[in-house]
Image (tube, rainbow, N blue to C red):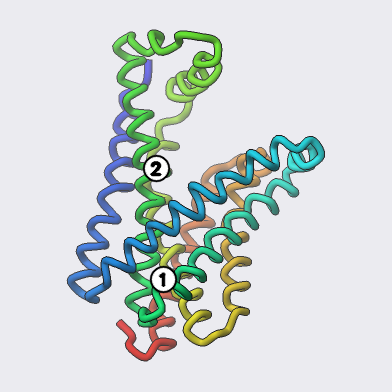
Amino acid sequence: MVKTESMISLIISIAIAIIIPIVLTVYFKKKYKISLKVLLVGALTFFLFVQVLEGLVPFVVFNNGPASSLLENPWAYMLYGGLMAGIFEETGRFLMFSFLLKKYRECKDGLAFGLGHGGLESVMIVGITNITMLAYAFMINNGTFDKLLINQQTKDALQPVKQQLISEPSYLYLLGGIERISAIAFQIALSLLVLYAVKENKKVYLLYAIGIHALLNFPAALYQKDVITNIFIIEIFYVFIAVGAIMWIRKSRKLFSNPV
């Protein structure tokens, strides 16, 4: 049976992941008059450059014997994961601002783009995923989950999910939602940095954004490889980074001719 606490944590996590982007969109639209076009392009950038293009890379890398073997090393995996995220996401921002959003060079445009990017990421990575997990949890508890296990391939895919829902601590599901708040702050901060790179034609700031993004992903990669085993170390790290991101967002207003 899946614990009631786990199901409540999933529900709260889903609510955070979906409601926070909506609330921020309404707030930014009302206070800063952000462009919904820029917000939607930010969301499109996440979908295109992360879900589609970056998502193709593992099929190439992990089907390549030498590369796959190399990535069994946690430090190589850390570099791979961090740099892939940084290169695809920040290059995507740069290209979108350079070509699709040529007329959008204000601070509020960086806010809108980052919110669109981080908001869709929140909905897809945590919201939709946890909705699926919650549905599985209900099925496990009412005895219908095993009806999904129609063949060995399905069993191999779903049995670990069942075991995870039953055995993992409830707070892990809650942390996923809370972490999205920090992630949205990161995405807004990095969008402003890349927008500044485009506005001032200083491509070095794109490199800074790629490097920062990679560094932000390193702890999570090391956690996946069991180099870091305490999840709270990761979460505390992201809280401090989120505070830094918010400070950068506030200070970056001075870099634009029309600060919010």
Q: Where is residue 221 in the image (x, y as percent from the top left)?
A: 62, 46
State the residue at coordinates (38%, 78%). Answer: 250
Q: Which of marks 2 and 1 is in front?
A: 1
Q: Which residue is drawn at 58% across and 48% down?
A: 220
Q: In which quarter of the image is the N terminus?
A: top left
* SS for dot 1: helix
Residue 247 — which label? none
Say few, some or many: other residues with alpha carbon within 10 Å of mark 2 (under 14 / 14 to 19 / 20 or more).
many
Residue 100's mark? Answer: 1
Residue found 32% across the figure and 25% down from its top: 135
Query: Could you say which quadrant of the image residue 130 lies in?
Result: top left
153 above or below 96? Answer: above
Helix, strand or loop at label 2? It is: helix
Camera-side residue: 213 or 61?
A: 61
Q: How many labels does the image show?
A: 2
Residue under numbered circle 2: 126
Residue 248 percent across, percent down from the top left: 45, 76
Amino acid type assigned to the residue bearing label 1 in the image? Leu
Q: Is residue 77 left or right of residue 240?
A: right
